[in-house]
Amino acid sequence: MASFNLLLLPGDGIGPEVMAEVERVVAWLKQNGICDVETETDLVGGCAYDDHGEAVSDATIEKALKADAVMLGAVGGPKWDGVAFDKRPEAGLLRLRKDLNLFANLRPAICYPALADASSLKRDIVEGLDIMIVRELTGGVYFGEPKAITELGNGQKRAVDTQVYDTFEIERIAHVAFDLARKRRNLVHSAEKRNVMVSGVLWNEVVNEVHAADYSDVELQHILADACAMQLVRAPKQFDVILTDNLFGDMLSDQAAMLTGSLGMLPSASLGPEDADGKRRAMYEPVHGSAPDIAGNGLANPIATIASFAMALRYSFDQADAADRLEAAIAGVLDADLRTADIMQEGKSQVSTAAMGEAIVAEMQKSES
Ligand code: IPM
Ligand code: MG
């Protein structure tokens, strides 16, 4: 049986609850001789800050660098609102992304047929939706320097964030988007703001160059990021792969998530460059946040996190069959009308976080026997 090691970083809020359901799936895979995922659990985010004063420790970063893959739950919450900016829970997540060089963030937004009515948009607009957002994750305004608030000496302050992109950063994320499009519907929309930002001008230029050099078989469309937001709610099915920077990708992926019915449904994979053996560092996490308002009540939807683990099976562990089965099990429980609170609708059965995890495992068991 193939064996892998997975570092679990449940984090804050609902993170530990949804991660427990991944552990349930991991245990089932092992019991059934499918694959042996050895897990180790560590702290990140507010809980790490409370424990040792940093949102992620050097020792945790070391473990993450050594693991075959990392799974993150969620970080943050009002409890840490007063914490210094560089020690905030989110800083731990950003450091993990940066130190592991996870420049490519894949955020698939799929509308399960059973959930088409849970979306705030009309069924015919979202039914069959299958979008892949490819978000650049280690550059742009999240990391650009200078980044500071300074006193101007006249009672005013000035805050500066810097949007920076180098050619190589745009090239490598464009390659990821075009390669993915080839396995999908062969269409890439590249979203930037070249009408007002020079980083958008360079983004557009470099994407065109990569396209002309290696991907003339893939259809490329350029779209301004604001227009992309508008088209995502007007006619989302026109999109296949959306290629965009760190900040626009953050916003567009939350928006795309809601098309699928709930933020609780959207998984993500963050990948580093391929090494000489064709392996990539990777971290998998739900797109949703820590939802402190519902934490600890069994109300959280574990599907985004379980689907993120399915992505780990596919992209890091090369277990495509297990990933297919897990994804089919998720669709199966939704078809069987089980719903967590966030996707609850009249006539369906509301279940807790743990009951949803149990049902997904039971669905996998059905396909086993
Ligand atoms: C996300 C989140 C993070 C981000 C936060 C928690 C730092 O919103 O992964 O989309 O802005 O990237
Ligand atoms: Mg976000």
Image (cartoon, helix red, strand yellow):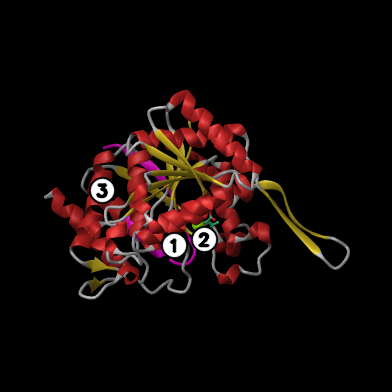
Q: Do the CB atoms of the residues marked 1 and 3 lie less than 8 Å apart?
A: no
Instruction: Please give the name of the residue rendered at 19% of the width and 61% of the height, measured from the top-left corner.
Output: 335
State the residue position of label 1: 15
Q: Disc 1 versus disc 2: distance between alpha carbons? A: 7 Å
Position above or below: 290 against 148: below
The answer to whether residue 42 shows anywhere in this view is no
State the residue position of label 2: 75
The mark tally for this picture is 3
Q: Amino acid at mark 1?
A: Gly
Q: Residues within 10 Å of mark 1 (few under 14, many from 20)?
A: many
Q: Which portion, as a residue range, is magenta? A: 1-23
Instruction: Please give the name of the residue rendered at 27% of the width and 62% of the height, measured from the top-left corner.
Output: 123
Instruction: Please give the name of the residue rendered at 33% of the width and 55% of the height, measured from the top-left corner.
Output: 306
Position above or below: 117 against 29: below
Q: Secondary structure at mark 1?
A: helix
Q: Disc 2 versus disc 3: distance between alpha carbons? A: 27 Å
- Residue 368 image offset from top left, x and y in percent: 15, 49
Image mark for residue 29: 3
Q: Residues within 10 Å of mark 3 (few under 14, many from 20)?
A: some
